[in-house]
Amino acid sequence: MFSFFKKKKIIPHIRLTGVIGSVGKFKQGIDFNGQEEIIKKAFAIKKSPAIAISINSPGGSPVQSHLIYSFIRRLAKKEKKKVIVFAEDVAASGGYLIACAGDEIYANSSSIIGSIGVIYSSFGFKDFINVVENSRGSKLKKDLGIELFSGEFWSGSKSKELGLIDGIGDANHILKEIYGEDVIIKKFEKSKGWLAKRLSSENYIDSLSNVIEEKSIWQRYGF
């Protein structure tokens, strides 16, 4: 029985959800410091052939996006592991930049993908274009008469046509398809600390302004 379980493939699965960077006084979104240890632990599982990353983010800080992207690529090269990314509702702007750390990117047919090169409020992704071109390379379909770097965003289905993603499917389905039905998917996700929970509950006005600020970012994509 021991040898049976030992032979099963283990795929660490990291989940990154929310706006990238700080949102308000007490709420921290996706940032490098908050995710560094989780990403390290996922890559430290020696026998795993790949790392899965699910992203659900409308973007945010270009600096934090690039730090996370670069860190994932550096560890992937060092540990010689494949990175498979799954976009959930949204992988836009900085969220798509992080997705580009994947050797393969998958999404739901209705996922929102893109906003490459968009610059508004504190979001600046002019240099984000180079990252996309370097990571996606010849997969990008630039001959379809659509400007990929105008800040536009598309459905998952259209994004596949444009070469922004590699396929349609969710993490569970795709990972089982690649590594077998008995693959073990080990989840890694940053939990909310007790202090953050207490602060957010005790500071209602600050919490409310955080929600409004974060909601305005998501609303660009219809959420």
Image (cartoon, grey):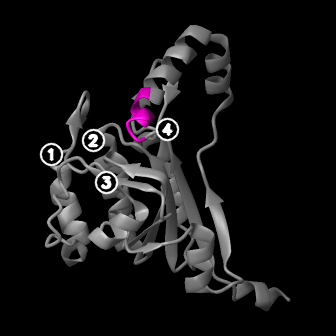
Q: Are marks 3 and 1 in contact (CB under 8 Å)?
A: no
Residue drawn at the location 44% of the way across and 36% of the way down: 218
- The answer to whether the residue labelled 3 contacts the one labelled 2, judged by CB atoms less than 8 Å apart, is yes
Residue at image location 40% in from the left, 32% down from the top: 217
Among numbered discs 1 and 2, the one appearing first in the sequence? 2
| Overall secondary structure of the magenta section | helix
Q: Which residue is mark 3?
A: 97
Query: What's the residue type where badge 4 is placed?
Result: Phe
Residue farthest toward the right in the current orientation of the protein: 1
Per the image, the residue denoted by label 4 is: 223
Between the C-alphas of marks 2 and 4, the distance is 21 Å
Q: Amino acid at mark 3?
A: Leu
Quick check: marks 1 and 2 in contact, CB under 8 Å?
A: no
| Image position of 29 (left or right of 45) | left
Residue 210 belongs to magenta span? no
The answer to whether residue 187 is above or below residue 36 is below
Tag 1 or tag 3, which sits nearer the N-term?
3
Q: Secondary structure at mark 1?
A: loop
